[in-house]
Image (cartoon, rainbow, N blue to C red):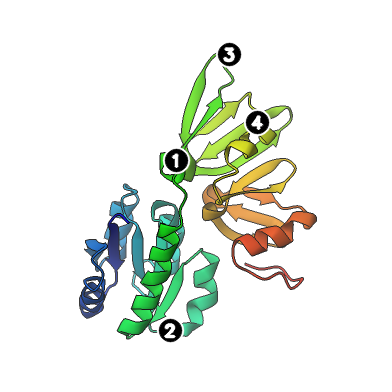
Amino acid sequence: MTTLKCAIVDDESFAIELLSDHIKLFPDLMLAKTFTNPVSALLSLQQSDEIDILFLDIDMPEITGLELAIKLRPHVKYLIFTTAFSKYALEAFGVKANDYLLKPIDKKSFIESIQAITAAESKKTPDRPTELLFVKSNVKGKFVSIRQRDIIVIYVEGHKLFIVTADQRYETSDSLKNIGIKLSADTRFLKVHNSNIINLDQILKIEGNTIEMTGKYKVPVSENRKAQLLKAIGIENKGSSSS
């Protein structure tokens, strides 16, 4: 397995020191960046996709960890909240956190959390690292490549198909069915309606039959596909809406 780069955001220096010691337990982890100022973390980490695991405190001044997570979730592969308060647990998993560790973080809890991540890394398919989706543009004879993890939503509007990333909207002459086939090996993508496919990693929240995605895109989910959606993001469908 390749080395996983880590970053820590916590306004308490001693908490960073403790996590740093825990990270040293794993030869496959490397601490790349630490921040005591959440604003500095936001400015730095939004400019890069190089961080694999982000350890993020919740109760911080100026910007809370939950607010920071919404901005940074698309830029990191794994998100682990670290906090002294258990009351934030539900909200934490609403922004697709991989784990939630209560302070003071003991070695056993930390090791179990990292082992779950390294196990997930070892199971990834060899096709995943290519990360490129090639589609026909709306210009005859022209093709464009789009990095798959950057895709937020793919949707049909009228007779046109659009692929949306954080900074661009691509119009393609490809069909939704064909795009779905191309993305079928990537478990991040799920068709939630006859007219759209979403990237599960880009979900901000779900309210009723509406999914709010990164960039404030709102996507409908069909009633007959909602159970599959909830299962895909690890929430059991008990007949009630989740957020």
Residue 161 bears which disc, if any? 4
Q: Secondary structure at mark 4?
A: strand
Residue 131 bears which disc, if any? 1
In this rendering, which labeled residue sits more in front, label 4 or label 2?
4
User: First in sequence: mark 1 or mark 2?
Assistant: 2
> From mark 3 to mark 1, how far is it between C-alphas?
24 Å
Q: Secondary structure at mark 3?
A: loop
User: First in sequence: mark 2 or mark 3?
Assistant: 2
Q: Which residue is mark 3?
A: 140
Q: Secondary structure at mark 2?
A: loop
Vertical arrangement, residue 135 with respect to residue 12, above or below: above
User: First in sequence: mark 3 or mark 1?
Assistant: 1
User: First in sequence: mark 3 or mark 4?
Assistant: 3
Q: Amino acid at mark 4?
A: Leu
Q: Amino acid at mark 1?
A: Glu
> From mark 1 to mark 2, how far is it between C-alphas?
37 Å
Is the C terminus in the top left, top right, bottom left or bottom right quadrant?
bottom right
In the picture provided, is 103 more to the left or to the right than 218? left
Q: Nearer the viewer, residue 215 or 224?
A: 224
Q: Amino acid at mark 3?
A: Lys
